Amino acid sequence: MNQNLQIYGKKVCCIGAHPDDIELGCGALIANIVGKSEVLCVTLSDNQKNPSLLGLVDEHKASMAVLGIDADHDMLLDFETRRFPHQRQEILETLLAIKRSFQPDIILVHTKNDIHQDHITVMDEALRAFRGTTVLGFDVLRSSYGFFPHFLFEVTEQDVDKKIAALAEYKTYADRYYFESSITRATMIRHGALAERPFAEGFDLLRVVAQFGFD
């Protein structure tokens, strides 16, 4: 088996539009790196203007706890869902403030192949805010079309199980097909197969900043 490319990120910032986006997109990778890297998760909308989603805040916090994210590294903001294109400047300013305070080495955000207006706005503003920083795009199955993972992070079966357990905390979404544990596991297996590994989390390349090391 070929040796894996080694990626070093002391600080990793995961940015999602809504509760569940980060867990769906990169939950296994978070489980893999938490404790080795400082991981900050930023969710821009709490979805609390929808009366059918009032349980999401507690479910989100429980989900993040399963992945090992402490409450002080889980930011849940109150931008209005489906109105992100009208709030671009405020979102950009929020991300610039996070850049100044957290100074991340790697950004994980929505793929460029997402069709949800909020998701694509977050991706656009992340690329603007974090110039000079590696930015990788994750897949949220229900709204990304044409996504193909060109960057594959090997994860363990235990990481996959953690991702499935984290998603299971979302009782509000229990009947939605993209929360099926079999689909989550199959996706991790497929991405692993693309890399000739048992399991992998897949991303597209939005911006990669790197240098060769010769030590």
Image (cartoon, rainbow, N blue to C red):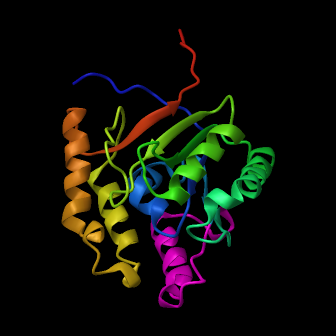
- Residue 38: x %, y % from top left: 62, 50
Which of the pair 137/185 is nearer the observer?
137
Corner quadrant of residue 25: bottom left
Please tell me how many numbered marks the rendered image carries. Answer: 0
**115 shown above or below 21:** above
Residue 165 lies left or right of residue 23; in this view the side is: left
- Residue 89: x %, y % from top left: 75, 53
> Extreme front residue here?
86
Instruction: Please give the name of the residue rendered at 70% of the width and 60% of the height, measured from the top-left corner.
Output: 87
Instruction: Please give the name of the residue rendered at 61% of the width and 69% of the height, measured from the top-left corner.
Output: 45
Residue 116 lies left or right of residue 196; in this view the side is: right
Instruction: Please give the name of the residue rendered at 31% of the width and 42% of the height, measured from the top-left corner.
Output: 146
Q: Split into 4 quadrants, where in the image is the C terminus?
A: top right
Instruction: Please give the name of the residue rendered at 62% of the width and 38% of the height, measured from the top-left corner.
Output: 127
Q: Is residue 159 magenta?
A: no
Which of the pair 52/12 is nearer the observer?
52
- Residue 134: x %, y % from top left: 58, 32
Magenta-colored span: 45-73
**Can you see residue 186?**
yes
**61 shown above or below 82:** below
Q: What secondary structure characterizes most of the magenta part?
A: helix
Which of the pair 215/138 is nearer the observer?
138
Q: Split into 4 quadrants, where in the image is the N terminus?
A: top left
